[in-house]
């Protein structure tokens, strides 16, 4: 076994299994664990994902937000043990992989269009789940068939 294989094996063990699926342009909340003295607390950072870089254990993402009229940006390691959880609040529709142009904007110009799913995608997800009336009808048919067998 060479060095590269050993490193890949060690990295594979350190990767988080439950990673929230998010993309550039999404509005997310990142909950990070912070140590203050001997106490640990969780702090939330809400903003828009403007970049994702790297792969594997060294994958990072940048989150941008505007607070008190000033732009703030923070870079997080995706597989860091300091990240408690990541929540996706809104999916954004963008055509770029890096949204660095948002750094110089403020107000309405810094907003990302929300992503609207097409009607076909919505109908596919709805057709996969039976409605209440369909499920009650199928239960009624099953009970009638069971009574006919007796």
Image: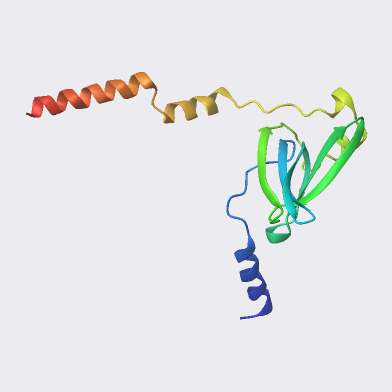
Residue at (92%, 30%) from the top-left corner?
A: 69
Residue 100 lies in quadrant: top right
- Picture coordinates of residue 13, whole percent (x, y): 60, 65
**Up-down relation of residue 4 to residue 147 (above or below):** below
For the N terminus, the image quarter is bottom right
Residue at (37%, 21%) from the top-left corner?
A: 132
Residue at (43%, 27%) from the top-left corner?
A: 127
- Picture coordinates of residue 72, whole percent (x, y): 87, 39
Question: What sort of colour scheme is used for the picture?
Answer: rainbow
Depth check, front residue: 11 or 116:
11
Depth check, front residue: 96 or 9:
9
State left or right for residue 60 relative to residue 20.
Answer: right
* Numbered label tally: 0
Q: Residue furthest left?
A: 150
**Up-down relation of residue 47 to residue 107 (above or below):** below
Residue 92 lies in quadrant: top right
- Picture coordinates of residue 2, whole percent (x, y): 65, 80
Depth check, front residue: 13 or 119:
13
Residue 9 lies in quadrant: bottom right
Q: Residue furthest bottom?
A: 1
Depth check, front residue: 102 or 45:
45
For the C terminus, the image quarter is top left
State left or right for residue 41 relative to residue 136.
Answer: right
Q: Residue furthest front?
A: 38
């Amino acid at each position: 076994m060479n060095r590269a294989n050993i490193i890949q094996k060690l990295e594979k063990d350190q990767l988080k299994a439950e990673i929230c699926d998010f993309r550039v342009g999404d509005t997310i909340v990142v909950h990070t664990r912070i140590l203050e003295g001997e106490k640990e607390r969780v702090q939330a950072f809400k903003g828009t994902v403007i970049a994702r870089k790297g792969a594997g254990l060294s994958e990072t993402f940048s989150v941008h937000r505007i607070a008190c009229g000033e732009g703030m940006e923070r870079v997080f390691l995706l597989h860091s043990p300091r990240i408690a959880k990541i929540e996706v609040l809104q999916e954004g529709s963008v055509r770029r992989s890096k949204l660095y142009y948002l750094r110089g904007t403020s107000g309405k110009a810094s907003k990302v269009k929300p992503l609207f799913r097409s009607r076909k995608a919505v109908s596919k997800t709805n057709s996969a789940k039976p409605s209440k009336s369909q499920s009650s009808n199928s239960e009624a048919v099953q009970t009638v068939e069971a009574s006919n067998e007796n």
